[in-house]
Amino acid sequence: MKKSKLGNSRLEITKVGLGTWAIGGPWQFGWGRQDDNDSMDAIVESLDAGVNWLDTAPIYGCGHSETIIGKVLKKIGQKPIIATKCGLIWNDKKEKISCLKAKSILAECDASLKRLGVETIDLYQMHWNQPDEDIEEGFEAMAKCVKAGKVRYLGVSNFTVEQIERVMKIHPLTSLQPPYSMFRRDIENDILPFCEKNNIGVIVYSPLQKGLLSGKFTPAKVAALPADDVRHNDTNFKPPLLEKNLKVIDRLADVAKRNRITVAQLAIGWTLRDSAVTAAIVGARRKGQISETAPAADVKLSNDDINEIEEILKERKK
């Protein structure tokens, strides 16, 4: 699988990485029940398919996602590039709390290392930019983790350009992780150009818009999602936007068919068309899913394809 250098680091990451939000299982922002054996099979399959990095976070399942990854790594005896995060903790009721205080960040790092069963985290990312007034304190604590040898490189997620500039004054910034898909394109105006100019790697999440751009959803399948699936709260999965989305996806399917790829591969490959995007994070909950999406790393869209997709996406705004 194709690899690219991540920002100013020495990390060479595959164009597609495995995201592990869903395998965290049920929690406040979970995707419903998840079988741990299925999760482990999905991780192993991704590595066998050539994916060389995993993206996770302590908050995914309140520690469960990292724990599952740790079990897999111990079982297979190999260590891919590990990217995890900090800044979101939880209380006894497993309710999410934003905290960027130094003491909390340092404790989170140690807890992640223990759950993952590794000596070093390759990429440590500030998960969210709240509370804004504590960003500097939190990032300084992350820099201490680097100096202590617990972390190799630092990144941020969901940050604005102004916030990125602030942390760059504290410690070299390797990457940004923003949401990006055919249905969510706000980073194109300022964030992507800024990152490219400043040699900041960009690893995008939700290129399939939480699975919607897989091309496998119908209104009935959306309605059948588990009651505790976070996608029930997403306007993209609700009328009237859902109907518009599905019509657009039907037209995208024609472009995919002409290129002899799936809609999912088209959607992921489309995000990778931008030179500022280093790689895309793709989730998998069971064996068979990543083997379908991983080939997106090699998708090459013609200018005609890209222009046609632009015209199709305009229909969604009407």
Image: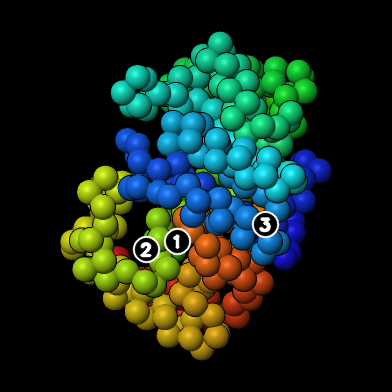
- The residues bearing labels 1 and 2 have C-alpha atoms spaced at a distance of 6 Å
Q: Earlier in the sequence, mark 3 or mark 2?
A: 3
Per the image, label 1 sits on a secondary structure element best described as loop
Residue at position x 33%, y 26% in the image: 95
Marks 1 & 2, CB-CB < 8 Å contact? yes
Mark 1 belongs to which amino acid?
A: Leu
Neighbour class for label 3 at 10 Å: few (<14), some, many (≥20)? some
Residue found at the far top of this picture: 103
In the image, residue 227 sits, relative to residue 160, either above or below, namely below
Per the image, label 2 sits on a secondary structure element best described as helix
Q: Earlier in the sequence, mark 1 or mark 3?
A: 3
Residue 47: mark in rendering? 3
Residue at position x 40%, y 61% in the image: 211
Residue 156 visible? The answer is no
Neighbour class for label 2 at 10 Å: few (<14), some, many (≥20)? many
Q: How is the image coloured?
A: rainbow
In the image, residue 116 sits, relative to residue 31, either above or below, namely above
Marks 1 & 3, CB-CB < 8 Å contact? no
On the image, which quarter does residue 313 sit in? bottom left
Name the residue carrying label 1: 208
Disc nearest the viewer among 3 and 2: 3
Q: Nearer the viewer, residue 264 or 307?
A: 264
Residue 194: % across, % down:
61, 45
- The residues bearing labels 3 and 2 have C-alpha atoms spaced at a distance of 24 Å
Residue at position x 35%, y 36% in the image: 27
In the image, residue 261 sits, relative to residue 30, either above or below, namely below
Mark 3 belongs to which amino acid?
A: Leu
Residue 212: mark in rendering? 2
Q: Quadrant of the N terminus?
A: bottom right
Q: Nearer the viewer, residue 16 or 226?
A: 226
